[in-house]
Amino acid sequence: MVTRFPPEPNGYLHIGHAKSICLNFGIAEDYNGVCNFRFDDTNPSKENIDYVNSIINDVQWLGYAKDGNILHASDYFDQLYKFAVELIKNGKAYVDSLSPDEIREYRGTLTEPGRNSPYRNRSIEENFDLFTRMKNGEFPENTHVLRAKIDMSSGNINMRDPVLYRIKHESHPVAGDKWCIYPLYDFAHSLSDAIEGVTHSLCTMEFEDHRPLYDWCVENVSAPSRPEQTEFSRLSLEYTVLSKRWLTKLVEDELVTGWDDPRMPTLSGLRNRGYTAASILDFCERVGITKNFNAVEMSVLENCIREDLDYSAPRVMAVLDPLPVTIENYPEDEVEWLSAQNHPKRPELGNRKVPFSKRIFVERSDFMEDPPRKFFRLAPGAEVRLRYAYLVTCTEVIRDQDGNVVELRCRYDPESRGGFAPDGRKVRGTIHWVSQGNAVESEVNLYDRLFAVPNPAGSKDTDFADLINPASLKVVNAMIEPQIESATSGTRYQFERSGYFVLASQNGNNGKPVFHRTVTLRDSWAKRN
Ligand code: ATP
Ligand code: MG
């Protein structure tokens, strides 16, 4: 069993490509076969080395092609040229000299057959001579093409004498200046598969109509093997776009910071967002392979990373919207180091020490002046548990001139160390906090879905700027417990009660650590719809 993954280096890989990677490399693994990693680099105009490097990096990040064995369709340019000559010699291909517009016009439509080109009946000798001169660079672009001689009245437009080669006076990233004619996709792809001995050429549904041409190519030259094409439906994911055309537009219109912006569905974007390779493999497994179109809900992807990080990420306390609290009866200048579990569900990960002091921060949303009945957090007169620390009761609310709450005063129960009520009284609410004197001020990028609508590409409003979720990025200044100071970039945490975060850098703007929110703890979109 030989499969292949054939990316075109004209953009970064996205989560849809991951589906194809998992399928092709996965099947080869399951059946003791091989999967060839081959760049489909037949169009030098759109390709660049940054794309090539990012693609290699992403495939290897997913755990595949680690042997570094990388193939190129351009490695076969000599052989493909010979196949083209073979078609000419057998009267199965001809050089057409219609302009690109005329070729389009002669092609017909879905309801009308095409017409034969006036050049269709050139002799084999003339075709061979013209094709040789095309290759030798004697003609400008768009003056001649090589076409397969199949059937201009075919019901399948792909079979109406498709173009096999065109002139392009451009140098190629791998082949250099050797060629000024380049093969088109259907010809290059099918015959590259045949040259490599690919047995199963798995591609997405939009190539179903190309299958007769795929077969025609391998059947009409002396191909060394007979690969077979099978189609599956492409991944489509809600609240984002998965086509390089649209992703390029987002980058070019500067609606994101680049291909690897953490809101992009690219593998590099997801990695920057904090997604693990394992969570993406898990996602590909869950969505499975079918021939039916269906848009997968974003929550399916989000649940994969939630499950992974729920198990693997150690917990820390971080206050994203800090409200100062002074504990009036706690001694000035004292710092107590309290024991906190790194992972409540995995005692084997041990405990850490968290500093507690007279002045702490709590989350602004954990206080309500006039709370509804089931609000069990801080409110005037209410008692709450500070996680791993003490029970505190709010005694006073301090406001500024405009009436905004700027500080809370509390009293703590010195007998409640660890958060246990000495008399067994019931305290329902538990909130997180950090000590003001010990907290590490950090920049936290709160990422959310890039688009506000489930199907942006299908929207009538094609101006993406109008469809972007205005809350897709919110930057906050957070206060985090000192545990994070020794972490290296890429370390992932659960910030208790808020979500999963990855350390992007210890040294971002103003020397502060920078965190990216990977995903919230719960699906906040579920209730909105
Ligand atoms: P795009 O539409 O994003 O430009 P593409 O198909 O042109 O994608 P390629 O680089 O040619 O991109 O794709 C390499 C392989 O990945 C192909 O075999 C293609 O079928 C597959 N692939 C691309 N997008 C998806 C997707 N959304 N779901 C599954 N497979 C995909
Ligand atoms: Mg393509």
Image: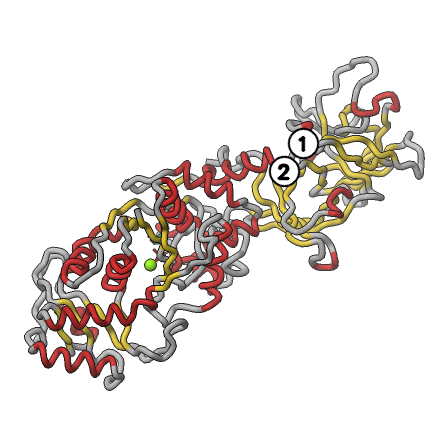
Q: Is residue 344 above or below residue 478?
A: above
Does the closest atom of ligand 1 sit within 8 Å of the Cβ of label 2? no
Q: Amino acid at mark 2?
A: Ala
Say left or right for 106 vs 72.
left
Residue nearest the viewer, comparing 113 with 122: 122
Which residue is depicted at the point 15% across and 75% down? 96
Mark closest to the chain's N terminus, 1 or 2: 2
- Disc marking residue 313: 2
Q: Are marks 1 and 2 in contact (CB under 8 Å)?
A: yes
The single residue placed furthest to the right in the displayed view is 332
The single residue placed furthest to the bottom in the displayed view is 138
Determine which quarter of the picture holds residue 89. Answer: bottom left
C-alpha span from label 1 to label 2: 8 Å
The residue singled out by tag 1 in the image is: 343
**Circle 2 residues within 10 Å: few <14, some 14–19, many ≥20:** some
Residue nearest the viewer, comparing 270 with 285: 285
Determine which quarter of the picture holds residue 162. Answer: bottom left
Say left or right for 109 vs 234.
left
Say left or right for 417 vs 138.
right
Say left or right for 22 vs 334.
left
